[in-house]
Amino acid sequence: MSRISPEEVERTAHLARLELSADERDAMTRDLDRILDYVASLQRLDTEGIEPTSHPIPVPTPLRADEAAVPIDPALAILNAPQAEGTAFVVPKVIASEDEG
Amino acid sequence: MSSEVLDEILERYESVIGLEVHTHLRTESKLFSPSPVRYGDEPNHDVHPIDLGMPGVLPVLNERVVDLAIRLGLATHSTVHTHSVFARKNYFYPDLSKGYQISQYEEPVVSNGWIEIEVAAEAGTSVRKRIGITRAHLEEDAGKSIHDTAVAGRDGTHIDYNRAGVPLLEIVSEPDLRSAEEAGAYLRALRQILRYLDVSEADMEKGQFRCDANVSIRPRGSSELGTRTELKNINSFRFVEEAILAEIERQAALLDEGGRVQQATMAYDPGTGRTHVLRLKEDANDYRYFPDPDLIPLAIAPERIEAVRAELPELPDARRARLESELGLSSQDVAQLVATRSLADFFEAALATYGNAKVLANWVLRDLLQALNERECEVADTKITPESLSGLLVLVDDGRLTVRSARELVPVLVDSGGAPETLMRERGLEAVSDVAELEAIVDTVIAANVDIAEKIRDGDDKPLNALMGQVMKQTQGKANPGEVRALLATRLRGA
Amino acid sequence: MPETLDTVPLQRDALGQGRVSSRELTTASLERAECCEALRLVVGTRAEAALAEADAADARRSRGESLGPLDGIPALIKDNMVQLGEPTTCASRMLENFVSPYDGAMAERLAAAGAVIIGRTNMDEFAMGSSTENTIHGAACNPWDPERACGGSSGGSAGSVAAGITALALGSDTGGSVRQPAAFCGVSGMKPTYGRVSRWGLVAFASSLDQIGPLAHSARECAMVLEAICGHDPRDSTSIPEPAPALEAQLSGDVSGLVIGLPREYFELEGAEPAVLERVRQAVDALERMGAKAREVSLPHTSYGIAAYYLIATAEASSNLARYDGVRYGRRVSADDLGEMYRRTRSEGFGDEVKRRIVLGTYVLSAGYYDAYYRKAQQVRTLLRRDFEQAFEGCDVIATPTSPETAFRLGEKASDPLRMYLSDVYTVSAPLAGIPCISVPCGEAEGLPVGLQLLGPALGEAVVLRAADAYQRVTDHHERRPEIAL
């Protein structure tokens, strides 16, 4: 039984905003299937009650004083912009329903 | 929608409402970057590489927001967690510069509290109702997408990251609200608390205070919950109740037709007064939350919570109760006095130098509030001081300034400040209290109005006012009306 | 540059004695980089700026001033560390034309130490790979055998040191990306404790694993560089709030009584080249002859390391790489609507391996899979950390091979991602546990360098470096140089 279907690969690629050709999708399905099969070995391990590690070296929560610094020069901000107008970045027209926030 | 139709719907259906409020925290710099929090600047003038999600940048938490979150937690009787976790909420949108928003998900900084609101009860009375706060968590705001074709043209959208990274508290209520009015009352109460605490300016027009509403309805008497929809981004205080009522009506119409409500995200259009579907639940994004590996969980020492508690200002509810019992003012007056912290502070400071609470309250609620409303500002942002208002009232009490003149001076104090006595002199408003001078004027007026004077001498009181008016006119309003009346009476009728 | 001046101490002494100027060293490095162009180790140089900085270093020296032992010494940084006004490509089409609007911590620290950054080194795209073949700049060739891979992802940094372009280079290590190429190229490469070196300005691959480390011929040089780049940085929340330790001064050469743990599981691994295991055993023998004691230890969860590593690394990467959307910087493929612009930009901007990892990482974080994959992997990470904590109760350092094999042929594994992942078996556990580790050359197998990996407890850089340096005092593997036919 395969662990991941081409449809799941496609759905996941969409979540990541990647477009795959049919060939790419099938190749990726094969690769991911093998990789998921391999990582399934973890399921053999009983981890009941084990705290997950998000940070290998615990440090106290660093806090920054609430002081405003001089912002970056707007010219530098848009230095690499593929498209800009004035100091604003420009993207293709966004339709309101695309709002995912 | 006619109000009869709505009333009829509300008679049959009960609404169940929970609100999610996003409020900008009052800070100098952003949540995770040192760029300034400012409003109204040119696009991308208030950004740091962190806000732009440049390759290689990292977030560091602003210390101030921690204390502000604690304040809000304590003021809402919530649990302030000594351990909370920042998580990434992953989705793509151009004004989201990193492809994820840093928020709190499974472990928020504040949870499980309540605030009280006042709701209407039978026969014009009101009762207090407790509304649960499910949680409050810290997160960063996104930038702005400017769709306006006048700015961005027909084919493009402009992206401005000035707002990106501005600290937000998202405050989620329990679905304890049962009507649009209650929702409005809750929002007002919450905003009042946020402002009292200096946690947020909570100005809806500036986008500092935004509200999403989860709305469902059920037949009255039913205890089951209906399917809810989420009204997104209600961007004006005025529209909150309208939007909720419109959504209640839409859902009721669906149910009445035998249909069912679908889980969806809705938007309210103030132009049409209707709500419409933005997207259905099936299209919901998979946000792939996980703990942000660039940030350490937020550990708050219990001592820090206690330190914030010690500095917590008196909250509106407590202040109202205290003023009512201490000063014997009407509950309506007190509610107005404590509406904002700056007004209540002003009132109490003035009271310290002017003992008559009732008189002071009248002046504050009538003349001062009117001046503030005309200027759309808070008392703290003006030049008037508590000492100058009480000084003004003392001049009135001493008969050196007429009420009319004093009322003229309130807006002057608001705009320019200054000492009341000096202002009174500069403007020549000092009451005519020189008896000889006043007697001379009264005699002149009587001599010029022999007929009227005769009537008064015969016992007719009505024309007295006409003579008083003339005396006041000649003194340019600077005479004490009581004194003038008494003087006229003495002169015409004897002692 | 005279061949004899290819280490930091040699350069430092020659500069100090006035036998050479920083300008001469820098010129020689730039020339060497050009000579070795065919190996595709260096992907961009900044000759003019570097020479100006070299002149400034020379001017300081003539005034009797010095910024420290690295003052005036040429260096290379991996092409994923940003420097104000310089390109950073991450070997990706996505950032092909990106110029950084800000300075990263490494550019600052090296400048503060007087080191002269001459350019940027080749790497696997966004540091994802073990061969420096996934790169828009062309696969990097191993100076020991140009038909073979440098390893990766910091292959360009390791190869540049091996080829004598600069004496020192910085790499970044997520699952072995400094140590494995160091082993393949016969140089020393260290991954410090997580949080020792600031990640400010390091383009993120997997935030909870990424750590910058030095590559040089010897452990001593690694210590010198580490001293310059370590230390707390308030811009990195995961930075350890400790000052940089004095490391070079602790290189006593004394390992008597030092207990070296040999993890049973690492030496029992199937598929490890016998010659590699043999060289590592010989290296341990050499340390024992100096007074160290070897004993077996156990790291029972070792076999779960790769699975946990790839789940965590790809999950974090899928999120870290979401910012490459064609809006603010980097490649954009135009389209009429926004969604199409996103998809085409990202599909054309990223290479196959990066896309594979993004999809895998997105999948393991998505609804319904988070607990089974990501959370589970983070729990296994806890078990791996405990393994090391327990092992270090009975030993001071742990010795293992760095890689189960020597440098493989270019293209040999390119078509089999899983096989490529499995070759990281010895290197992934240390970053999962956050502990410091180094790879040093310990001989050859069929003419190709073999790496010895030494691991220490958290913040134990000093003991790791002391053991590695002591070993290099009695051996000369780190002094061997490839003969490069150019």
Image (cartoon, rainbow, N blue to C red):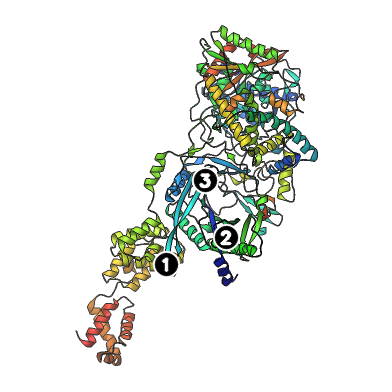
Task: Using a 10 Å C-alpha cutoff, classify the residue at mark 3 as few (fewer than 14 neighbours), some (14 to 19) or many (20 or more).
Answer: many
Tell me where residue C229 appears, x and y as whole percent.
55, 27
Give the label on residue B218, or none. 2
Element carrying mark 3: strand
> Mark 2 to mark 1: distance in Å?
26 Å
Q: Which mark is residue B138?
A: 3
Which x, y percent locates residue B424?
32, 68
Tell which subunit mark 2 falls on. B
Residue at the farthest top position: C289
Give the mark nearest the N terminus, 2 or 1.
1
Of marks 2 and 3, the one in the foreground? 2
Marks 1, 3: nearer the viewer:
1
Q: Nearer the viewer, residue B152 or B450?
A: B152
The answer to which of A95 and B89 lies nearer the viewer is B89
CA distance for labels 1 and 3: 38 Å
Residue type at the position of mark 1 = Thr
Chain of the residue on which disc 3 is drawn: B
Placement of the N terminus of chain B among the 4 image quadrants:
bottom right
Task: Measuring from the top left, give residue B185's x and y in whole percent.
Answer: 48, 60
The furthest residue to the right: A23
| Residue at x 56% of width, y 14% of height | C260
- Mark sitting on residue B125: 1
Query: What kind of residue is marked 2?
Result: Arg
* Real-space CA distance between mark 2 and mark 3, rounded to the nearest whole angstrom: 33 Å
Q: Which one is earlier in the sequence, the residue at label 2 or at label 3?
A: 3
Which percent across, then down, holds residue B145?
63, 52
Which residue ends up furthest to the left in the rendered image?
B495
User: Is C432 rendered above or below residue B344?
Assistant: above
The quarter holding residue B12 reads bottom right
Amino acid type indicated by mark 3:
Leu
